[in-house]
Image (cartoon, coloured by chain):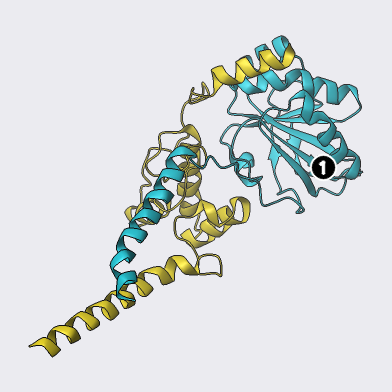
Chain colours: A yellow, B cyan
Amino acid sequence: MRALIAALLLAAAAPALADSLMPPAEYADTQLPDPAQERQAKALMETIRCLVCQGQAIADSNAEMAGDMRAMIRQRIQSGETPEQIRQWLISRYGAWVSYDPPLEPVTWPLWAAPVLLVLAGLWLARNRFRRRGRKA
Amino acid sequence: MRRLILWAPLIVFAVFLAVVAAGLYAPTDRVIQSHLIGQPVPDFELPPAIEGRPGLASADMRGGRPRLVNIFASWCIPCRAEAPQLAELARRGVPVDGIAVRDRPQDLAGFLASYGDPFRAIGADNDRRVQLALGSAGVPETFIVDGRGIIRHQHIGAIMDQDIPAILAAYEAAR
């Protein structure tokens, strides 16, 4: 019975974008006063994945947690951290998955090599085509 | 060989379709495990979420005894569902600490009054800084921290009846 109630509660909770009753964090949607710092922060936010609305960057997400992450990034940039330090901090907690800027490592090398391989395959196909045509003429 | 090359684009397209279809029918809804398991709890010091009760600091987790740290919030519906299981864990002698995420004291007091209060201490994580530092991606989540402050186990989502043995085992293993 308890499990049933719990299941019903969970079912009721699933679609709701659960948000707290507190106001959004100070820097969630407020730019930093220094335009250069804001530019750095924005560039980083565009490459950090939202944890609750996976598939969106935190820069684009309306989730409260994404707002908190934006605020954290802005404050840390303001206090002098580099975007790369913050990215590494997040990766050390959530894994490389949290970053939309995948590092070059054994797991990701197909990702980086695929375009090169496809272009090479295309060149090879084209070369064969041109050769054949050349012979005919 | 020529035959094969003629068919190759169609085959590539079929593979592409299969990948897209698989992704549509079974979208990846990933559970994000914290990468801090096996590592020390990051330093933090949270003020009390409820007046007159202790807050929560990472220093509390190096007291030689393992602890259970529950990340929750009064606005989180599954947290209500796991309340009886947390009470059961507390009854079995597991020290339960809480981190209340973005919670107003009046809402939290109402939550504890309605769903029970197994917490020794509750820290107020109003800007989610500690939740992010722990590598937690939502509420509720539960961590088991051993007596030296090393994170040993993470449970993601509400603790249900069937999860209690695993959590007790992780607690015992952390002793």
The one nearer the camera, B24 or B121, is B24
- Residue B43, compared with residue B158, is above or below; it is below
Instruction: Kindly indicate the quadrant of the structure image that contains residue A1.
Output: top right
Which quarter of the picture shows residue B1? bottom left
**Residue B101: % across, % down:** 61, 30
- Give the answer, above or below, for where B59 lies relative to A35: above
In which image quadrant can residue B142 be found?
top right
Instruction: Count the numbered circles shown.
Output: 1
**In the image, what residue occupies the spot 40% across and 34% down?**
A62
> Closer to the camera, A44 or B87?
B87
Q: Nearer the viewer, residue B54 or A64?
A: A64
- Residue type indicated by callout 1: Met
Q: Is residue B161 left or right of residue A46?
A: right
Can residue A136 be seen?
Answer: yes
Taking B67 as reference, is A78 left or right?
left
Which residue, given by chain and number where applicable, does mark 1 sit on?
B61
Label 1: few (<14), some (14–19) or many (≥20) C-alpha neighbours in 10 Å = many
Subunit bearing disc 1: B
